[in-house]
Image (cartoon, rainbow, N blue to C red):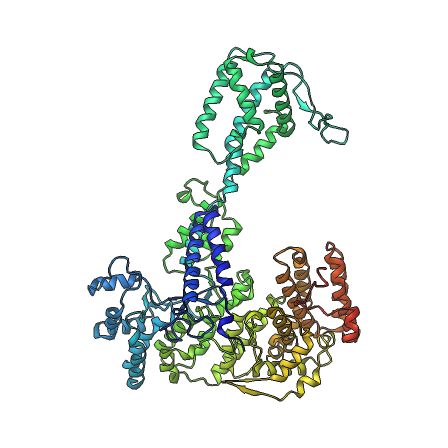
Amino acid sequence: MTDHSEITLGYPLAQLARALFTATHHADEATRDRARARATRWQQVIDGMRDGKQLVVGSRTPVRGAPAWATLEVAPGGFATGALLANGKLAWHEENLAAILDATPADGDVAPDRSVLNLHYVGDAGRAELTEWLASGHYRVDVPEEGALLVLDWLVAHDRGDRAETLIDTIAPYFPKLRFYPRPASSSPRPSEQVQLEPASTIARRLVARRTPLPIVRMREALGVWAPIRDRALSLFLETVEGDVPRLRREANGSLARAQNGQPIAEGGWPCRRFAPDWRERARVLLAEHDALRKKHSLVRGPEDPGEPYARLRAFLARCADDPSALDGRDVGAIRKILASLVTSQGVPGEPESTRRRALEAQVVDAPDHAALAHVVARRIDALGEEDPTEDVLAPVAISEAVGISSGIPIPPSIARRARSCFSGTVVELAARGALRSSEMLAKVLPARTAEVRASGVQDPELRRLSVAIYGAFRRRRSLLLLGLASQVKVEELPWVVAIEAEHIAGPATRAAARSVLRETAALALRSFPETVLPNKLVRELSTLDALAGTQIPLLEELAADIFAGALTAKFLRAAQASARHLEGSLYARYYDLPIARVLALDDLTRAGEKLISPGLMALATERAEVPEDVLRRVVRNGKILEQVQILTTHGLAPLHATLELEALLRPDLSSMAERIFRWICRKGPLLHTPGARLRALKNIAYAWRQLLFFLSFAEPSELETFRSFARAHLHAQREPFRSRFATALDGLDLAARGETLDAPARRAVPCLTGWTIGPHWLTS
């Protein structure tokens, strides 16, 4: 069993270093600000872990003195920072109330005492506000704690005094720290079937923070400011040429001819042979203009770089403007070579080739600035207030908005995609619109549907709406890093949810609705993202729907190899046995040589603390992982074992597929799903030879391959044959060495398709594709 001491400072320190580097070196100021905020959070994590008094990493209650139900600030990786999200500085609505109650905290107080504010909402005046909000729906619950006093008010109003008393006894000790009241709003929340990926205010802030990348600003300066004045300097010297325009000589094949010393050879006439009467005056004007421009435009280094042709030409221009006769033969030769180089690369100013080039460059310079267009869309979204944005915010720029940009310019696709993240719609509409680009994004919007199903058994409309709000806020909590067999806090553990649990009556209608949403969502995720396993956030949401539906599907979250406790709970055994029954005799079973009979015979559940575990399944996975006893790297050993667990259980895919009868929903898309997975694998192929990305790419490709084999197990023979032909042809179009190496994986698929099993002898010739390896992997070596 893993203990807390195995969580080291390595990951937090690496994240702190990355954030500090970005905060110091990134060109964009908004990005630097975000990086500084990340660095502060990681420093809090590290400080808390070092002293051991503030944080207990790996525990369900990592912050000393905070109950399990408190919403924590959690950094990536599941590390609690020690901050509580219902604590911290007063929000705007709290500041307004504090001013009314004469309870404004001292300046700079980052953790003000909220006792007066919480007690206000327990009193008559505050309860009247809560009652009004419950009736109108004009409130928002951003973190679950903010729904507690609304629940209390409902309980008191509906004569649930005993539960109200229990609730107040539970939360009152935390009145000084935590905010238990909601944020007022000017409207009711949107209908539950309408979901939103991001709040409109968040998207508006991100659009406002958008800046034109520095390389693009430099390019525009180079083309719009310095290219024209360089052409003028070039033209001035070309006026002085006697004979043909100097150019660099080219060979017959078009390459530059070079002298024995490797330098390009100039040919044509010679400069500085004739000067118009006003030439020197025009040269002085150009030099003065250059100096004036340089004071305004200093991002491009080239105009002052002594090694750049224009900088050298300008130096000679200054000498000629003073006294052309001061130049010697070497100077004139140098000028001739500079002119030849510029003419060869840029053309003669005013001639058709150069004019076309300058026209194209002018289009680049005059192109609408994406940052300015992003700001236009942000202002439109802000102007809507709490009203949901629609396609109207993506209309071309109006005359009244054209500040620094031309009217009529359309909004670029990249900005439109970002803005559409705050458009509301059904889950299916968001998927069809292309707004859901991953299973993680699906997991982000699904809680709104789940909340409605969960609350459908609540008879009182006010409480039903409140229940939806609390559940949505709870699902926005980030998961903690947990050790051993500990589980994440569930919504049913929140004291104010416990107080109203008796009001939820999960009848047949609720169960039917939950099953319908569960089936629809699972099919949507698998159809839309067949190459990836269901992410943990989505699994947790599906598990809630499963519990409401009463289907009892063993849905599995991905376990982390670095903190794996070495035990598999009962649901893993249930998933393995359901997979064995569903896949017996299938392509998947033959490829992975599944020990069907052995899995089905397992009946060894043993209690370990509060959990039931299966030592037999763990032993089988360890045996199949074939990890030598002398392997000292615990993460690699755990990774190989967990991958075999995923193979045996199909990572919960088979139980989901069988129980919800997903084959009927997925069959029309089976061929396109298989082809999508294989194309995705081939796109990831180059990462196998990219340092720093290799290990993740191996794991993800192995995951996708396993998903592919699962879906192909339900294909008709003709469909399987068509896919195999497609895969060979598509792989042939890939680059080496991926092409020849991945052909081995297709050889294994061919064996399984012919009815053969990749047992131990076969694996010596055609290895089974897995992601974890000891030593070099056959896909990369």
Q: Position of residue 779 (x, y in %)?
A: 71, 62
**Where is 527 relative to 515, above or below?**
above
Quadrant in which the C terminus is drawn: bottom right
Q: Nearer the viewer, residue 227 or 646?
A: 646
**Where is 654 relative to 445, above or below?**
below
Quadrant assignment, res 364: top right
179 relative position to 716: left or right: left
Q: Position of residue 43 (x, y in %)?
A: 42, 60
Q: Position of residue 27 (x, y in %)?
A: 48, 45
576 relative position to 105: left or right: right
679 relative position to 100: left or right: right
Residue 623 visible in the snapshot: yes
Q: Residue at horizontal 54%, vertical 60%? A: 433
**Where is 449 relative to 300, above or below?**
below
Quadrant assignment, res 311: top right
Q: Nearer the viewer, residue 303 or 501?
A: 303
Q: Residue at horizontal 36%, vertical 77%? A: 463
Q: Nearer the viewer, residue 75 or 399?
A: 75
Q: Position of residue 273 (x, y in %)?
A: 61, 12
